[in-house]
Image: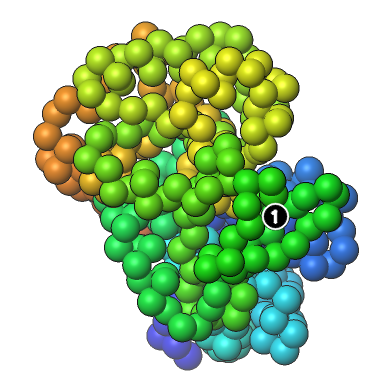
């Protein structure tokens, strides 16, 4: 029974740790999933709580996984684990039956599961947590209550720190469709070859919204609003990178087939991004990019009318704008106003809004882009692997020292007991 419990704790704890970790390092992406759930439940008016709710739930999931794996605060952790697993199981059953949203978001963007696979995963977790919950009072403690809370608090603070850095700047490690090294042309080709879904584009004219297919796009008198995928495959989210110019013409192919290196600023909320200083910084960047033979593009989830109203009509002639929907812009870059360097359809490097020097120093665009891209991919992979190794190694080390201390305490208690006079 003891060995069985170890296996159950390993399976449950590691699953919760991984699931919580990949969502912790992408709080913006997690908030999008929370918003989808709120919209389905007709609670869209609470979307302002999506980021904080996502961070709290991800952190709680991560901490419960650590506690179960380390065998600390088992009574509290078992209760939380049972409640969360039952809730997730019921939720995924509803997703399986009614299919209201495409992806449950249980592993963030690190892995996509069908609703059936997600439901089976939660059934497996229930099988693990039920015996743990039943025997929650039988687990031996290896350290004091204070030490257990101290260690768990340390893990919580570190995880929260990762989440805040990822939210303020950009994800520490990125798993999405637009991560460094992505070949946009190949992804678009694979998406177009799929027969399982069709992208529908929503345009507006005179207050009327209509849906169009890619082969039947309207003229420039219509304004692009959004896009959606119909009958999308359950195993993965379809890749979408639909960009239009001011006239509403599709220009994605133009952007990715050019031999000219492109520095793209992705803005998913123009009103919250715009300040005079930031626009001055972008102007400096534009001049520097053009000096080295590149182009600066601004991908914005807005309309030409709003851009002209906020920035002035001169902005439309001064800068190259590409227009897309909110979902695409935030998928391209989690940082509102973040930058990505595109060359030959490859995403070579990404910066947060604060990460790119405001003085226009983008000398990296003059370097060998293949080497730079490989270097960035390796760097991200190392950060991810080192984080996982350090986390698991620290858990093992803490468990070992707690056990040593507990054994010493037990031997001391036995020695004192044997020395007591009859």
Q: Quadrant of the C terminus?
A: bottom right
In the image, 238 versus 200, the foreground residue is 200
Colour pattern: rainbow
Percent across and percent down for residue 134 are 67, 84
Q: In the image, what residue occupies the spot 34% across and 67% down?
A: 189
Percent across and percent down for residue 25 are 49, 47
As drawn, 71 above or below 32: below
Q: In the image, what residue occupies the spot 58% across and 41% down?
A: 247
Query: In this image, 376 relative to 184: left or right?
Result: left
Which residue corresponds to mark 1?
Answer: 203
Callout 1: helix, strand or loop? strand
Give the total number of marks visible in the rendering. 1
Query: In this image, 194 relative to 138: left or right?
Result: left
Percent across and percent down for residue 260 are 25, 35
Q: In the image, what residue occupies the spot 36% across and 46% down?
A: 254
Looking at the image, can residue 48 be seen?
yes
């Amino acid at each position: 029974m003891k060995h069985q419990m170890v296996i159950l704790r390993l399976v449950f704890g590691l699953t919760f740790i991984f699931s919580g970790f990949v969502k912790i390092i992408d709080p913006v992406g997690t908030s999008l999933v929370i918003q989808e759930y709120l919209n389905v439940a007709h609670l869209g008016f609470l979307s302002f709580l999506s980021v904080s709710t996502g961070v709290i739930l991800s952190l709680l999931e991560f901490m419960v996984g650590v506690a179960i794996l380390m065998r600390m605060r088992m009574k509290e952790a078992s209760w939380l684990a049972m409640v969360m697993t039952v809730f997730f199981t019921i939720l995924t059953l509803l997703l399986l039956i009614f299919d209201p949203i495409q992806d449950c978001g249980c592993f963030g963007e690190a892995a996509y599961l069908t609703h059936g696979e997600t439901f089976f995963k939660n059934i497996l977790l229930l099988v693990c947590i039920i015996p743990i919950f039943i025997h929650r009072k039988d687990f031996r403690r290896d350290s004091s209550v204070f030490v257990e809370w101290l260690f768990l608090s340390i893990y919580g603070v570190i995880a929260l720190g990762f989440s805040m850095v990822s939210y303020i700047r950009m994800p520490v490690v990125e798993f999405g469709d637009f991560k460094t090294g992505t070949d946009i042309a190949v992804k678009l080709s694979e998406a177009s070859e799929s027969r399982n879904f069709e992208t529908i584009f929503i345009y507006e004219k005179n207050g009327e919204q209509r849906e169009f297919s890619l082969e039947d796009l309207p003229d420039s008198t219509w304004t692009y609003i959004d896009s959606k995928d119909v009958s999308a495959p359950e195993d993965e989210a379809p890749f979408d990178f639909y960009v239009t110019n001011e006239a509403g013409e599709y220009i994605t192919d133009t952007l990715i087939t050019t031999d000219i290196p492109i520095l793209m600023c992705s803005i998913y909320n123009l009103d919250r991004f715009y300040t005079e200083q930031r626009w001055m910084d972008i102007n400096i960047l534009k001049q520097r990019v053009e000096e080295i033979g590149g182009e600066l593009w601004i991908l914005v989830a807005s309309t030409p009318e709003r851009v002209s109203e906020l920035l002035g009509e001169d902005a439309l002639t001064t800068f190259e704008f590409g227009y897309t929907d909110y979902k695409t812009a935030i998928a391209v870059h989690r940082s509102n106003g973040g930058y990505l360097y595109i060359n030959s359809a490859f995403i070579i490097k990404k910066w947060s809004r604060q990460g790119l020097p405001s003085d226009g120093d983008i000398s990296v665009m003059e370097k060998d882009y293949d080497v730079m891209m490989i270097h960035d991919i390796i760097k991200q992979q190392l950060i991810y692997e080192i984080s996982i190794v350090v986390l698991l190694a620290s858990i093992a080390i803490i468990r070992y020292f707690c056990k040593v201390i507990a054994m010493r305490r037990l031997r001391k208690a036995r020695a004192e007991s044997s020395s007591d006079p009859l």
